[in-house]
Image (cartoon, grey):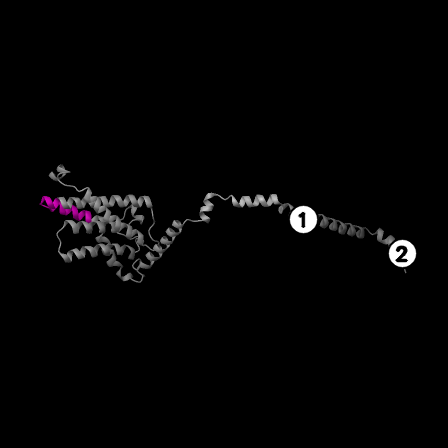
Amino acid sequence: MPSPRISRAATSGNPNNANGRFEFMSLLTNKTSLSEQAPARLRTSDSPVHRKDSSSSQQQLPEEDCMKLNPSFLGIALRSLLAVDLWLSKTMGVCAREGSSWGSARPMMKLVEISGHGIPWIAGTMYCLYKSDSSAGREVILNLLFALLLDILLVAVVKGIVKRRRPIHNRMDMFATFSVDKYSFPSGHATRAAMVSRFMLNHLVLAVPVRILVMLWAIVVSLSRVMLGRHNVTDVLFGFFMGHMQYSLVEYLWLSPNTLPALFKI
């Protein structure tokens, strides 16, 4: 049986045991120092000054962020109206594609679209102006031509200002389009249909069935814009209203031999 002196000597002479004890003691020392530093950090983060700084940084938000967090009633109403407009326009676009629910009626709707296009109306008006042999008839037809040109100008200006894109389900296969026709608001067909129908009902002597057909034509042309997916509902509604206002403007700027005598002599 070994003596205690030999075992103590062997233990003290073994370098591995000494290093192991030193490493263990150093780990204990590091843990103790970390445990002492952690409460200090927590105390620093929980200090009143730190809480005050964090609360002040949260309260001092930019005005734009405050507006986003607290939207106005008008903004909510406009966004809701826009959502309803997009949903209703997509639901009513039954002829937007060949595979739509009313895709078989798409060719007929495109004929209605051409009947409300500006180029056929301007060309037909100029031909009637050339063939007219009465001064009263030339005056009416000349003002109709003026109304058509004014309609194209005003619609192009409004479209260029608003720059609303056409519905995503629209297929760009329209007849004779121009650069500004990539925009949707307002509907040029709706403005033209409303203005021309009101012009014809007030300045042409028409039978009752023909007057009814003129009004139905204006409604069908405006409705076809949504069915073909060309415009949203609000584009057509505003365009129809704008067409009525344009007619009032034409009446105010009516061209007569008294205002433009040289033109009527030609």
**Horizontal arrangement in the rendering, residue 91 relative to residue 29 (left or right):** left
Q: Is 125 in the magenta?
A: yes
Q: Toward which corner of the image does residue 263 lie, by quadrant?
A: top left
Whole-percent x, y for residue 71 in the image: 43, 49
The residue under the point 18% across, 57% down is 213
Most distant residue in the top direction: 262
Whole-percent x, y for residue 150 in the image: 22, 44
**Horizontal arrangement in the rendering, residue 44 relative to residue 230 (left or right):** right
The residue under the point 45% across, 44% down is 64
Whole-percent x, y for residue 177 in the image: 27, 48
Which residue has dot 1 on it? 39
> In terms of depth relative to the viewer, which is nearer, 37 or 67?
67
> In terms of depth relative to the viewer, which is nearer, 103 or 138?
138
What is the chief secondary structure element of the magenta stretch? Answer: helix
Residue kind at label 2, given as amino acid type: Pro
Image quarter of the N terminus = bottom right
Whole-percent x, y for residue 172 in the image: 31, 52
Which region is colored magenta? Answer: 121-138
Q: Residues within 10 Å of mark 1 (few under 14, many from 20)?
A: few
Q: Is 61 in the magenta?
A: no
Image quarter of the C terminus = top left
Q: Tell me the tag on residue 4.
A: 2
First reached walking from the N terminus: tag 2 or tag 1: 2
The residue under the point 19% across, 42% down is 252
Residue kind at label 1, given as amino acid type: Pro
